[in-house]
Image (cartoon, rainbow, N blue to C red):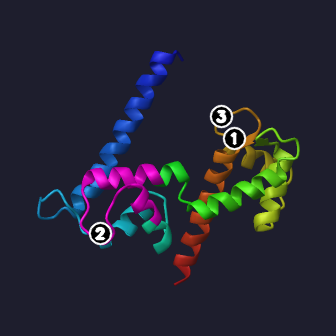
Amino acid sequence: VSFHEACIWVRRLRDVQREQLWEDFEALDLDDTGRAPFNELPALVRERGFTLNAAALEDFCREANLKVNEPFTFGDYTGLMATCRRHEGFRHDERDEMRRTFTRFDRDKAGELSLHMFLDLMNFLYGYTLHGEDAQMLLEHADANGNGRISFMECLHVLRQYRERELSRARGCF
């Protein structure tokens, strides 16, 4: 794939994502004012894969220049979603704590974790003990760039997916 083709693919992907966000927003803008009620925002963001507690929502709104408890525009929504993606849904203090933990398991100080180090990290955080094919599948899922190692952002992505899956299971119980 050439650089030009990759750029076209990224642009199309971004367009599809933007269309999905617009559909979400449009469903809430019932009076066609270009604004949607703030109280709908947490559920809207959760539908896009980010369950935010009140503190996280407030932090991300502040970073995205979105006023809490006031109707929001489509631009506000896309800005908030960009912030959620940039931080993988974790507040700054959570990311800092995870960075310290990640660094602790980065024994060779390469800024990335080997499969063994990543599995040690998952075991430390969640009691995960994976071996063989399961371990290899987790690495392949986590290793977005395919270099055989896990960067901090790749690690955050896996941790967010794990958190979302556990929250979904908990919601199913109630």
Q: Report if residue 53 is visible in the image.
A: no
- Residue at image point 54% right, 17% down: 1
List the residue tagged with mark 2: 38
Between 61 and 166, the one nearer to me in the picture: 61
How many discs mark residues in the rendered view?
3
Classify 158 as above or below 18.
below
Disc 1 residue crowd, few under 14, some 14–19, many 20+, Cα 10 Å = many
Name the disc covering residue 145, or none: 3
- Which percent across, then down, holds residue 98? 70, 58
Asked which secondary structure carries label 2, the reply is helix
The residue shown at (34%, 37%) is 15
Magenta residue span:
59-83
**Where's residue 56, x and y in %?**
49, 67
Q: Amino acid at mark 1?
A: Asp
User: Which residue type carries mark 3?
Assistant: Asn
Percent coordinates x, y for residue 61 in the rendering: 39, 61
Circle nearer the N terminus (2, 3): 2
Is 152 contained in the magenta span? no
Q: Earlier in the sequence, mark 1 or mark 2?
A: 2
**Residue named by callout 1:** 143
- As helix, strand or loop, the secondary structure at mark 3 comes to loop
